[in-house]
Structures are given as structure tokens and as C-alpha cells.
Amino acid sequence: MDLFNYSRRETIEVNIGATPMGGSNPIRIQSMTNTATQDTKACVAQAKRIVDAGGEYVRLTAQGVKEAENLKNINAALRQDGYMVPLVADIHFNPKVADVAAQYVEKVRINPGNYVDSARTFKHLEYTDEEYAQELRKIHDRFVPFLHICKENHTAIRIGVNHGSLSDRIMSRYGDTPEGMVESCMEFLRICVQEHFTDVVISIKASNTVVMVKTVRLLATIMEQEGMKFPLHLGVTEAGDGEDGRIKSALGIGALLADGLGDTIRVSLSEAPEAEIPVARKLVDYIVQRHNHPYLPGADVPEFNYLSPTRRETTAVHNIGGDHLPVVIAARLNGTMDFRPPFMPDYVYTGRILPKALPEGMQGIVDADVWMQHSAEGAELSSIWPAFKGDQLPFLSSCGASLKFLFITYMGLNDEAIACLKYHPEVVLVSQSNHPNRLGEQRALTHQLMKEGLKNPIVFFEHYAESELENLQIKAAADMGALIFDGLCDGIFLFNQGEAINGQAVDTTAFGILQAGRVRTSKTEYISCPGCGRTLYNLESTIARIKAATSHLKGLKIGIMGCIVNGPGEMADADYGYVGAGRGKISLYKKKECIEKNIPEEEAVEKLIELIKNNGDYNRE
């Protein structure tokens, strides 16, 4: 694939009602209801709101045959009111339910982790080769009749793998790995190919963005090797709500869309389903506008592994690069030091203003000519460093600072700049781009550095002119996603023109992007599902209560899950978990271990806080 120039992956067209996916069709937007599927009126009303917001598919959960049967009534009511949106049934644990649902909806989602395999127990089970093969035959024998029903009813399917619900069988052979997730999917895809069933869409999701991106990249590669061109459904599960959900989703989904992967997306927010649609639309529109952009002559290097990237080797300059966490640089061009803990940038760029005082632990950056003038006048500049522009390159050698910043573009990395950088390892590059595909240009810059053997750290300067914070969050996360997952990021410098969004909000976004990419933690992380018809308690109000009580706990991960389908699995790397166990009942987890079951909902948040306190984690700062 071309890492530097945008084009969509070639896929076959899949028929899903009157809204086909893949091929030359646009990237589709979808969401999922969170009302009880037996409540026809509520499901129809919510589906309408999703469609009115711009949703092109609506998914509903079907826990049992009764719910699957009621999909017929929901479908009919929508059609009667002129809503022709394709409906998708979401099935777990019971293949009989999938058989029924396939008669009444346009697409059925099945989960390979629990379609035939029993529910995950988190116990390591041993399978002989013959036992493993026998399990595959069981999948084949149960799955083929379902495909026949789908053929008869012109129903498409989605093979939807979730990181949190891999079977113990897959875990025994592959472990909790991207390879295991891909194989879980491929087992079913190969049967589809054998049966000449092509109306298939694939999703492969995780709440961990690093796992999600790596796995989808691997899946696309394996499918290509096996001659498959099925469309991809993208999503980050349990992304959360508010700014966290938007940044996390845009980072993971955006990184894949930017590489041409993805034919439909669902942004999973712990909010009303219709709130997901505008976020998804903004993300898709932002990525696809780079279609037919001016060609970028980048060249990838052999040491870069797209499927399993590692952090680019750099020389540490003070606290930037090497093994240091990526830094955050903020802009305060008026010299005002208005920062908010815990989102205190490592450096503040003040342009042509020499700051009079800096917050404790923070360092300053000023334009090189200003720095050199004050240095010549004997000013104290021990924690303030010069920033050079490309046309100031000849003056770089005459500056004695032990840390220097050089703003540079890919086209500015000419022979003169390369020769200069080979003699100046103390220079940190600040990558700029005005290209329609800034990700491609910034990737090209870093690959050129690797080709030349240059190990200068690189900070990505991402500039915008947004008046709405949500737009900034989506665009900045989408632009930074692949750079972080590729291991190229030594820092982020986020800049937004205009006063509509204050500097503190920009700083928070920068830290949020690094945390969503799992490269730097600055606050509590919440792994919370968007809710569906299986949700067993009031998700939104519960999340708000838990956040209010725990948001000060830096570095802690808390899972808040509506039911057990993905609950224990997706929050496996969380420190604590809050999972719906029954109507109005909650189970609490520490890591993968269930500590207390069936707690009344009204007591559960306090019990969670008590559990955190008893384990000595409530006073983290």
C-alpha cells in the first residue's frame, strides 16, 4: 500500500437492503439502538432519530428468539412511515436467534467468539489438533445452514470480532493477540468463500486503539493474501462519552480511514445513539476530502513495519525523544501563562515574546532571533529555547543552545537541511504541513529522516482554525492517529487560530490524543460501552456518577459495561470494572477477577469506590 497518498482500498459491493456498501459506494454511517428490542414503539422512534441525523444503517440487539421475532414488527413500522433504512440484528451466544433474525432484517451481525464456541471463561484450555479441528467442523456444520437462510432472504451478514469476546479455543492457540482476532474472523470468512456467499462485511474491534488499528491492518493484509475483498466496518468499542469518546474514536477509526481502509463506521459513544452520527459524518468527510490530492513522492524504508510498528529510534534531546514520553508543546502567543493541571504542557511557545516567568517544571520556546538577541544581552535563558524557521538554517550552527527547535516541512528537508542535521543532533524537528493530506506529508518526512540515518526527535505541529471544539478534537485526532500508531511521535504541538477555543481546551485535546493512543497517561481512563438493548442499568447517569467520584485518579482505568457480552473481555486491562449482571444488578471486578456479584444498582457506585479505596488506589494523583 501507499503510505503517503490517499486512496480507498478496493472492495466488492455488498447488498444491504437498498443501501449497498463497498465498491464505489460512499463510506456509510451507522449507529445502534439502546432501547429494549421488544419495545417496538421505542425502537422505531429511536431508529427514526438515527436516520434523521444521517444514519444509513440501524442495528438492534436480539438476545433471544422473542426479540428476533419482534424485528419483523419494527421493520414493518419503519417502512410504513417511509423509513427504508436497512436494519441489522446483533446476535451473541445463540445461533438459532440469528436464523430467525435473518428472515426479518437486511443484515445480521454474528460474533465468531460466541456463535458456536461457548462463552469465554478466561481459563486456559488445551486443545489437541484433532479437538481443534473438530471444533472447526462444528462451526462449519452450524454456520452453513445460516448462510442458506441468508441467501434465501437476501440477507447480508457481518462477521463481527470483538477483542473482549474471543473464545477460549482461539485464546488457547493464539493468545490475546491481533493474530488470534484475525484468525477468529478468517475461520468464518473461509466458509463464506467455500459456500460462494459474498454479501459479507467484516468488523474487528477493540477498546484499545493500538490493538484495534494493528488488527485491522493485519486483517486487510491477510484478506489480500487470500484474494478476499470484503468491505470493512470500523469502530472503537467502549470509547466512552464526551471528549474522550470523540478523540478515541477519531484517533483509531481515522488512522485506518486515512490509509483507505473502511467502508462503514460506527462511532460508539456512551450517549444517545443519534449523537454518534454527526461525529461519524465529520470524521468521514474530513478524511475523504483528501481524495485526488497532489501527489506526495514519499518512499517507505525497510526498517518500518506497517503491521507491527515499533517506536522510531531517536537521540534524546533533554526530555524529548529517546525513551521519553511524547511531549506536549502549547502556544501562548500573547505571553499569558493560563494553564490547568493536570494538563500542563512540557513547553510553551510564545513566539516573539520572551516570557517573564514560567510555571514550575515548564520550559519556554521563542523565535530564534529573539532568543539570540536576548542571549547576546546576557539575559537568563536556562529554561527557554530557540525555534528556527527553515530560512534561518544558516544561523543554526552559530547558536550555542543545547536544545533547538527547527520548524520544517517535507519539501524543506533538502540536502542543506540534511547535512546540517547530521552535525546537530541537539535539534528537535517540528514537522509542519499545509498539504491536503498532512498525514501523508508528515509520514514522508519521518521516513526520509530514517532513510538518511537521522535520529533527531520529531514533534508534529498540527494547526487548525476551528470555532467548535468537537471539530478540533476530531480533526486533530484523525491527523495524529497513524503517526502515533506508526511509532513516529516524540511530541505534539497543537495550535488553533482564533479565540473561540481557549488555550486550555487545546492543551486538554493534545493530552487526550496522546492518552487515546496509549503513549502518555494524564488522567483517569474510562472504558465505557455505548449501551444497547442488553444494557441492564442507566448507563449515562452511572458513568456521570462514577466520573464525578474518580476523575482525580490519574493513571487508573475503569471499565463501565452494560452487560457481560464484551464486559470482562474489553475491560481486561482495566484496573476496576462495573458490569451489568442482571436487571438492576451489578458485578464488580478487579482486573479480570469478579470480586462481588449481583449488587443492587443503587449501592454499586459506592461499592466500587469502596473497592478502589480498599486496594489503596483512591489517593492517586
Image (cartoon, grey):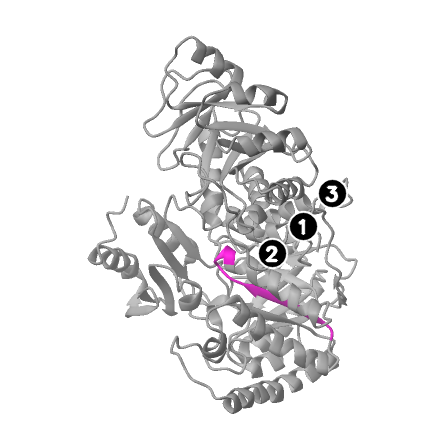
Q: Quadrant of the N terminus?
A: bottom right
Residue at 63% x, 54% y: name it. 302
- Nearest to N terminus: mark 3 or mark 1: 1
**Label 3 Cα neighbours within 10 Å, binned few <14 / some 14-19 / many ≥20:** few
Residue at 28% x, 59% y: name it. 608
Which of 339/468 is in front?
339
Disc 1 marks which amino acid?
Leu
- Nearest to N terminus: mark 1 or mark 2: 1
The location of residue 346, given as percent across then percent down, is 41, 33
Instruction: Report whether 7 appears left or right of 508.
Output: right
Q: Residue furthest top?
A: 377
State the mark number for residue 297. Answer: 3
How far apart in space, not on screen, are marks 1 and 2 (Cα)?
9 Å
* Residue 297, quarter of the rendered image: top right
Q: Which residue is mark 1?
A: 3
Residue at 50% x, 14% y: name it. 370
State the mark number for residue 455. Answer: none
Q: In this rendering, does residue 618 appear at all?
A: yes
The location of residue 256, given as percent across then percent down, is 62, 54
Q: Is residue 208 above or below residue 327?
A: below
The answer to whether residue 202 is magenta is yes
